[in-house]
Amino acid sequence: MDKWVTYAVISMIFAGFTSVIAKMGLAGISGELGLAVRTMFVAVFVIGFAALFVAPAELKSLAPHNLFWLGVSGVTTSLSWIFYYKALKQGEVSTIALIDKASFIVAVLLAWLILKEQITPRVILGCVLVGSGLLVVAYRPAT
């Protein structure tokens, strides 16, 4: 198995824990405060990780375009987290997490439009299955 697949599976497992643990941490506080506290922990952890594993010489390879696109990514990540935590505070983890993971469909479309990545029948089927799963979990019959 390729290393990136292993990393992606580990990411998936931790991401699954993240939503449930975050919901527990939001008890009695606002989603905004919870996100701010979580983000401080993330920043310290990631900076520490980078200090251990990024060679100082690698910093010289940072170009303005890297800073720009990573900055834009940071803004979109922040907006995603802000609205995710607002939803998490009010809704069910299962539905919110699935809606969030439907970002796969958005990512596929953007990768096709911007990065010119191929959309294969396998990827289309995956998008249909994710979208179908979202509808099944999110649908609430009238009572």
Image (tube, rainbow, N blue to C red):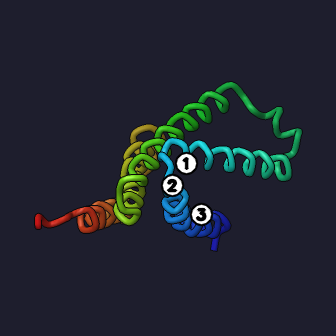
Going by the numbered disc 2, the residue's amino acid type is Leu
From the top left corner, tell me how far across and down residue 129 is, in percent: 31, 66
Q: Are marks 1 and 2 in contact (CB under 8 Å)?
A: yes
Q: Is residue 56 above or below residue 14?
A: above
| In this picture, residue 22 sits left or right of residue 95 | right
Disc ID at residue 26: 2
Q: Nearer the viewer, residue 63 or 14?
A: 14
* Residue type beneath disc 3: Ser
Residue to which mark 1 is pinned:
34
Q: Residues within 10 Å of mark 2 (few under 14, many from 20)?
A: some
For the point 24% across and 68% down, the residue is 136
Question: Label 3, on which residue?
Answer: 11
Q: Do the residues labelled 2 and 3 touch (CB within 8 Å)?
A: no
**SS for callout 2:** loop
User: Is residue 119 in sight in this rendering?
Assistant: no
Mark-to-mark CA distance, 1 and 2:
6 Å
Image spot of residue 78 (x, y percent): 53, 39
Nearest to N terminus: mark 1 or mark 2: 2
Query: Residue at 49% across / 53% down in the picture?
Result: 28
> Is any atom of residue 99 visible in this view?
yes
Q: Which-is-in-front pick, marks 3 and 1?
A: 1
